[in-house]
Image (cartoon, helix red, strand yellow):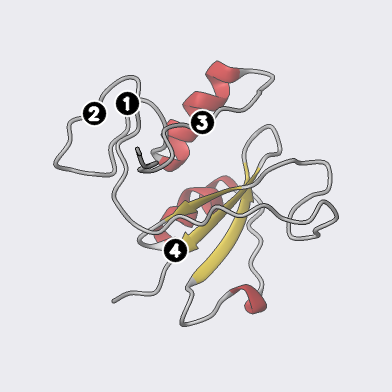
Amino acid sequence: MGHVKGIGGLFFRARDPAALNAWYRERLGVGGGCSADESVPPNEWVWNVTAGPLVFSPFKADTDYFAADRQYMINLRVDDLDAVLAPFRAAGDEIITKQEWDDPSVGRFARVHDPEGNPIELWEPPKG
């Protein structure tokens, strides 16, 4: 029997796919042509990621953890939340943080949105 080894892609609808792809590449270093693993050269079709934890969890249909008009929220694991948020701050974009989201045993969290209003949760796991 074979085993699933990880998520191979995330596909979602966009009003302007080219512009949204460019925003994710430029703002977050995410998407085709990006590499978070410095040992792997960039490839125009894939985003090379580093190994680590990934939460796969359906939420109740009436959750208030993210907007009711959205079917999903992507969570991106980051190594330095403040540094990743810097371009959002510089652009004057809304950044949502809540003290109850942060836990020393789980990590720190912030919420931002892409230009089409899709929620993005940024997660800095605890060091060590």
Q: Which mark is residue 98?
A: none
Marked residue nearer the N-terminal end (3 or 4)? 3
Q: CA distance from mark 2 to mark 3?
A: 17 Å
Position of residue 68 measured from the top left corner of the image (x, y, whole percent): 83, 48
Question: Mark 3 = which residue?
Answer: 23
Is residue 57 rendered to the left or right of residue 25? right
Which residue, given by chain and number where applicable, does mark 1 sit on?
33
Q: Which residue is mark 2?
A: 42
Which residue is rendered at x = 64% and y = 78% of the image?
99
The percent position of residue 38, horizontal first and vertical second, equals 18, 43
Q: Are marks 1 and 2 in contact (CB under 8 Å)?
A: yes
Return the x and y of residue 93 as percentages of the image width and height: 63, 48
Q: Along the horizontal axis of the image, is 23 left or right of 116?
A: left
Task: Give the amino acid at mark 2.
Answer: Pro
User: Is residue 105 placed above or below 42 in the rendered structure?
Assistant: below
* Residue 82 marker: 4
For marks 1 and 2 on the same chain, the one whose residue lies earlier in the sequence: 1
**Disc number lying in front (1 or 4):** 1
Q: Please report the residue visible at 47 percent of the width from the left and 73 percent of the height from the top.
A: 107
